[in-house]
Image (spheres, rainbow, N blue to C red):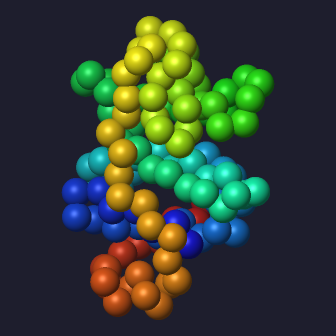
Amino acid sequence: MLSVVANDNARAYPFKVLAETTLINNQVDDTPILVWFDPYSETGTAFDRRYDGRTLTFSQGPERAGILADHETRSQKLAMTGKSITGELSGARLVPLIATHAFEFTWMAYYPDSTAYFP
């Protein structure tokens, strides 16, 4: 699972769900988050979706894998770094969150109050 911590609150995203969805706009308590997963490399990242007072909503970019686009500014970002490469937010970065690959039993030992994401 890919486990994410936002403001001391934790949520686990099972790899099986991520492999089917790959991009999730979600919320952990009061923090809007973006979770992205590449099923081929089993690499995942998470970011705070807020930038400059706005909460952004993301989808996969139009042509290339690993490119995300936000609906509000139509800026494109690199999924691994959260850095905008085109559009109104070009050069800006999303704030990364702690995202860890973990076995469920290990994660629950450290974050027993963690929630799990299921669509």
Q: Which of 30 and 59 is in front in this view?
A: 59
Q: In the rendering, at what x and y percent does residue 96 appear?
A: 36, 45
- Asked if 24 appears above or below 15 in the picture, the reply is above
Indicate left or right for 15 with 11 as reference: right
**Which corner quadrant holds the N terminus?**
bottom right
- Asked if 117 appears above or below 79 in the picture, the reply is below
Indicate left or right for 52 with 41 as reference: left
Name the residue at 45% across, 14% down. Answer: 90
Indicate left or right for 26 with 50 as reference: right
**Which corner quadrant holds the C terminus?**
bottom right
Indicate left or right for 22 with 78 as reference: right
Name the residue at 37% across, 29% down. Answer: 93
Name the residue at 45% across, 50% down. Answer: 46
Q: In the rendering, at what x and y percent does residue 86 appear?
A: 54, 13
Let me know if residue 55 appears in the view.
Answer: no
Let me know if residue 105 appears in the view.
Answer: yes
